[in-house]
Image: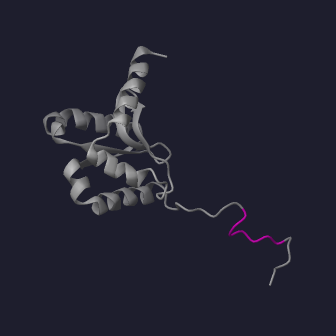
Amino acid sequence: MHAQSKNAKVNAKELRRHLTDPERILWKQLCSRQLHCKFRRQHPYLNFILDFVCLDRKIVIEVDGSQHADQASYDQQRSQTLEQAGFAVLRFWNNEIIENLDGVMAVVLDHLAVTHPHPNPPLEGEGVANHDQPARR
């Protein structure tokens, strides 16, 4: 294991222990699997630690506090790198999550619908006619 990836894993673990209030609020919405996909929090990827990511749907959600106002060019470059890797990047300010969680979740749900239009595909065997069996009444 490279020193950089080992450090990223240690840093990610520490960040998971110390979520900000907005991150904790959003995590409660993302972790329940009610969205029919698995999100990870504080996940190391390349040389970044992603706030939240659904690897299957390739969606990254970043929660930005006031410190991000001073690092807009870094955040833009980071988003471009992730987008080039095939991820959709959603960014929300802390106050958006606190004051408008329903609106934030609507944006997330819209992106999930675009990346996977059928979140509840039928279980194997459901919705498929079995012509070998007589119909039951």
Which residues make up the magenta segment? 125-131
Q: Where's residue 90, x and y in %?
A: 31, 48
Q: Residue at x 17, y 36 (%)?
A: 67
Q: Main secondary structure of the magenta part?
A: loop
Q: Front-most of 3 and 31?
A: 31
Horizontal relation, residue 75 to residue 116: left or right = left
> Which of the 4 image quarters holds residue 63?
top left
Q: Front-most of 91 and 12?
A: 12
Residue 130 colored in magenta in the image: yes
Q: Residue at x 18, y 34 (%)?
A: 73
Horizontal relation, residue 59 to residue 99: left or right = right
Q: Vertically, is 27 above or below 83?
A: below
Q: Where's residue 81, x and y in %?
A: 33, 34
Question: Number of numbered discs present?
Answer: 0
Q: Residue at x 34, y 59 (%)?
A: 105
Q: Front-most of 48 and 128?
A: 48
Quadrant, the C terminus: bottom right
Horizontal relation, residue 55 to residue 123: left or right = left
Horizontal relation, residue 36 to residue 102: left or right = right
Q: Where's residue 30, x and y in %?
A: 41, 52
Residue 79 colored in magenta in the image: no
Outermost residue, left direction? 70
Q: Vertically, is 133 above or below 107?
A: below
> Which of the 4 image quarters holds residue 54?
top left
Q: Vertically, is 137 above or below 66?
A: below
Q: Vertically, is 137 above or below 32?
A: below
